[in-house]
């Protein structure tokens, strides 16, 4: 077995692996999953916005109950 034969075997195996990965990635069965995965970064922003909105509602209800606490403008908590 010469080095040329090993190179040809490696080339064939590499080509088969590349084609298998391309087939897996572009398979119609996996399209929905990949679309959901593509939107994951945006889901974090939506969840954070929901948490911020609920926290703001809690702060508003607390501020109505607690008397005597004043906040300066630009101060968070």
Image (cartoon, helix red, strand yellow):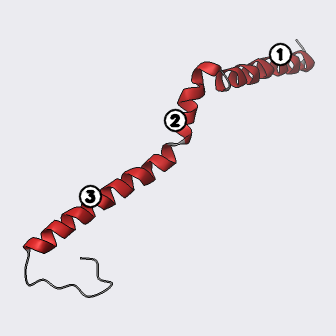
Residue depicted at x 12% and y 83%: 69
Residue 31, given in percent of the width and then of the height, sits at 60, 27
User: Nearer the viewer's eye, disc 2 or disc 1?
Assistant: 2
Pick the residue in front: 24 or 63. Answer: 63
Residue depicted at x 49% and y 43%: 40
Q: CA distance from mark 2 to mark 3?
A: 25 Å
Which residue corresponds to mark 3?
54
Q: Earlier in the sequence, mark 1 or mark 3?
A: 1
Secondary structure at numbered mark 3: helix
User: Nearer the viewer's eye, disc 2 or disc 3?
Assistant: 3
Q: CA distance from mark 1 to mark 3?
A: 61 Å
Q: Are marks 2 and 1 in contact (CB under 8 Å)?
A: no
Q: Are marks 2 and 3 in contact (CB under 8 Å)?
A: no
Q: Crowdedness of circle 3 by 10 Å Cα count: few (<14), some, many (20+)? A: few
Secondary structure at numbered mark 2: helix
Q: Earlier in the sequence, mark 2 or mark 3?
A: 2
Q: CA distance from mark 2 to mark 1?
A: 38 Å
Which residue corresponds to mark 1?
9
Rendered position, 15 above or below 55: above
Residue depicted at x 52% and y 35%: 36
Secondary structure at numbered mark 1: helix
Image quadrant assignment for residue 65: bottom left
Say the numbered circle drawn on residue 17: none
Residue depicted at x 43% and y 50%: 44
Tell me: 1 left or right of 24: right
Which of the image's four quarters has the C terminus?
bottom left
Q: Earlier in the sequence, mark 2 or mark 1?
A: 1
Which residue corresponds to mark 2?
36
Pick the residue in front: 31 or 14. Answer: 31
Pick the residue in front: 11 or 51. Answer: 51
Residue 34, given in percent of the width and then of the height, sits at 57, 32
């Amino acid at each position: 077995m010469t080095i040329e034969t090993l190179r040809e075997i490696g080339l064939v195996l590499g080509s088969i692996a590349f084609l298998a990965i391309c087939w897996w990635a572009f398979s119609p069965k996996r399209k929905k999953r990949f679309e959901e995965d593509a939107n994951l970064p945006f889901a974090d922003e939506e969840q954070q916005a929901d948490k911020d909105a609920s926290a703001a509602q809690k702060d508003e209800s607390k501020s109505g109950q607690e008397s005597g606490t004043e906040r300066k403008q630009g101060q968070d908590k």
